[in-house]
Image (cartoon, grey):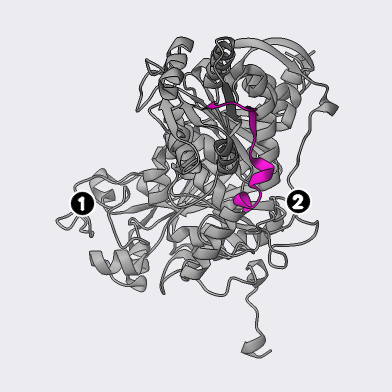
Amino acid sequence: MSLATFDHPLAKYIRPSAKSTANCPGCGNGILAQGILQAIDELGLSLDDFVFVSGIGCSAWIPSPSFFADVLHTTHGRPIAFATGIKAAMPGKHVMVVSGDGDLTAIGGNHLIHAARRNIAMTVVCVNNGIYGMTGGQVAPTTPLGLSTVTTPFGNAENPFDICRLVEGAGASFIARWTTYQPRQIVKTMKKAIQKKGFAFVEVVSQCPVEFGRKTGMGNSVQMMEHYKQNSVAIAKAKTLSAEELLGKIVVGEFLDTDKPELIETMAKVRAKAMASAK
Amino acid sequence: MANSAVLTGRHFMMGNFACAEGALAAGCRFAAGYPITPATEVAERLAERLPAVGGTFLQMEDEIASMAAIIGASWGGMKTLTATSGPGVSLMLENIGFAVGTETPCVIVNVMRGGPTTGIPTVELQGDVIQVRRGSHGDYQIIALAPSSVQECFDYTVEAFNLAERFRTPVFVLTDAFLGHMREELLIPEPAAIPIADRRLFPKGVDTESLPGFLDEDVAPMPVFGLGHKAHVTSSCHDAYGRRNVVDASALDVFIKKLHNKIESHRDEIVRVTQDVDGAETILVSYGSIFRCAQAVVEAGRAQGLNLGWLKLGTLWPFADKEIRAVAERAKRLIVLENNLGQLFHYVQAAAAGLAPVSFLPPRVLGEMHEIADVLAAVKEVRA
């Protein structure tokens, strides 16, 4: 087989007309796109079993337009609200939201916590690059304290969100965090998240070498992934460390996998009750 | 509560409930909303009625999410509605533009209240007429219907769904606090007597790579989700296949004009005007609840020997410019009655330009109805 005829094993999932990517060289999006598709492939599911929903920002380009599936590319911050309507109309489909930390936790923070509270069955993948990449490197609710960005030229004065703890407090039933340095773990976790009957949240800390690495001094893609490798701490290990020791570390792993009443299923019961009592 | 979607029969019902019943009769099976006076009863009625007919009502965290959810559910193949008032519309407008750009059928009931800003929630004002036309950014067309009775709250909501399905676009039903809370007779016909339109669907087994699903002036079939169409739906500038193009100004030109012409080229199918103008010198132009005043004024004026007629705009958008022009050609003058400081007045004036003078008359106190005596005095004044 010559290289010219070699097809990537996941190429069958890519929209034929999607010939290019909006992502910069070294972006973490590719690792995550592969992780999602690999998980779907290993589960033996078809992309026709899914509806993908994305917001606004670089990570929205993971499913849109590349995945050869039903994709709704929505307004900034609102993908989870759109996805809620989709799931209600199509309970049999897997609904997956792929978006960024700015989209999901700043402008869209309200929808994130309320969808988690409702425990509606959907997978929300949050690509956390700690910055607004598409607009040129502005501070985000996830940017570490003290870091210089184009809108915090003298250092970020605000504390960042711990998004996983946020959605845990809000009521999600599956929560995990990995970095792009852990692609195999991403696939494993993604498979669980997709199968979860409830609100499943996967945060992936991902490198933006152009707007984050270059401007904050974190370096290029390789240097940033090296940083993830050195600073990732497993949940069990993190429990043995003090707050000072955890400073600057990225706690990775599956934080929560629990079962609780799911919205769409509960609504179906409500409907059955209403239909039975109606005359 | 009944498990029949169509409550055929004679009712004494408030306008907000009539809108909800119109939605159910039209086939709406998903609604999302957020509480707001004076529109809440639409949501309350649907929350009670939808589950019993197999539907879903979700109370969302805000109006932004409500609008997003009904768009999502529409792509899931359902007929969908949200109901709100002006402040809610202000929050929904970005996603209403999204619905226009992605050609998503859905219905928004706006029970108008006193504004600007938080204003007075329980007082009616026809204050959002321009907001619904131009409120979302960019250039686009919208359809808006304005009922003037509880019966029309039902009929026009059914019609709004039919237009939304026919033209794959968001459609407004503009009622107000007066109509929403007013109770009067409502006759709901047999289901077979209610005309129902359904969106044209993408052919089975075809994906959007091989057949265009967007930007057809005659309305493209909708590649709804879940049927293997693999639709790429984006509100960013795209081509007829849904492929994003944010590079070429010429693509934007096509994107804007196709969406615009989809409504504009079918305006004769959409625009609804009723009139009683034969031989009348002075025509009162109005819509919504204020039409009730105009009709009463014409009756009272005729009894006094005044040569009056009325023209009622059933649709506010697209604007009935042609119909106004036709009336202005024969009449001596037009008076626009609105419960605001002059919103459609300027459009009527432009349509009648060079044919007949157009004057404007708000009620003495904004938020109240016109007094018959006030309007008759104004008619006599403009005649003099």
Part of the protein shown in magenta: B262-284
Q: Report the residue that reaches farthest toward the bottom.
A: A2
What is the total number of numbered labels drawn onto the structure image? 2
Residue depicted at 23% across the width and 45% down the height: A158
Read off the residue under disc 2: B201
Tag 1: residue type? Asn
Dot 1 surroundings within 10 Å: few (below 14), some, or many (20 or more)? some
Check the picture and name the quadrant holding the C terminus of chain B.
top left
Q: Which mark is residue A156?
A: 1
Q: Report the residue that reaches farthest toward the left.
A: A154
Depicted A20 relative to depicted B62: above or below: below
Q: Position of residue A69 (x, y in %)?
A: 65, 59
Depicted A164 relative to depicted B214: above or below: above
Tag 2: residue type? Leu
Residue B236 in view (yes/no): yes
Classify residue A131 as left or right of residue A25.
Answer: left
Q: Position of residue B320 (x, y in %)?
A: 57, 40
